[in-house]
Image (tube, helix red, strand yellow):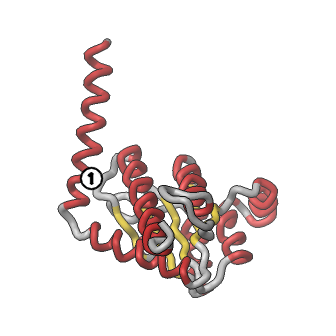
Amino acid sequence: MKNSIHQIINNSFKDSINIKSKILESNLINQIEKVSLLVMNCLQNGGKIFFAGNGGSFADSQHLAAEFVSRFLIERNALAAIALGTNSSNMSAIGNDYGYEKIFSRELDALGSNKDIFIPITTSGNSKNLIEAVNTSNKIGMRSVALTGATGGALSELCECIKIPSKDVPRIQECHILIGHLMCQIAEQEIFKSKS
């Protein structure tokens, strides 16, 4: 039993390192840099960053929004970020009145503007509620950049996607958090560099 557990741990670390190495060797680094600068510019110009996801990606959305609003690595002013779906009364009302697929799009329609950026987080790229939200984002004139798995799914037809080169859900999610942390770190560093 001990050997099999050791092997699980060993393999998981190796798989995680392997996917991150693939990202380092690909054009994704340039895309992550470009999107991080878009996020920074959005915040500097009075915009907000919206995150949304389902399940573990819902938790990741809350995690990343908190890094922007509270702080990441330095003491600084709050940065405007919102995780959609965290108001349970909104979610239950929208789900009941319009259907679960509208839980994010309805909030985005109420709170978003064309100065903002929407970052849906999804390993498949096929979640109906995120597709609806990207459609709403496009209608508003808001930029959307999805964090997805290898194919980008249906979202790849609707918006730019940072596609993690894997089909392994846990490994994809680990990379999504790393990229979200980088977006926050770059925004924080560049916006507040004269104050740190």
- Is the N terminus in the top left, top right, bottom left or bottom right quadrant? top left
Instruction: Judge from the rendering whether residue 87 lies leftward or rightward of residue 120; answer left or right.
Output: right
Instruction: Judge from the rendering whether residue 53 lies leftward or rightward of residue 3; answer left or right.
Output: right
| Residue 38 screen position, x and y as percent | 45, 79
Would you identify the image quadrant in which residue 176 lies? Answer: bottom left
| Residue 103 screen position, x and y as percent | 69, 63
Who's the residue at 26% across and 42% down the image? 15
Q: Is residue 154 visible?
A: no
| Residue 85 screen position, x and y as percent | 68, 59
Q: Nearer the viewer, residue 170 or 157?
A: 170
Would you identify the image quadrant in which residue 51 lies? Answer: bottom right
In the image, residue 186 above or below residue 64: below
Who's the residue at 37% across and 67% down the image? 162
Residue occupied by mark 1 = 20
Who's the residue at 62% across and 62% down the image? 69
Mark 1, Cα crowd under 10 Å, few <14 / some 14-19 / many 20+, is some
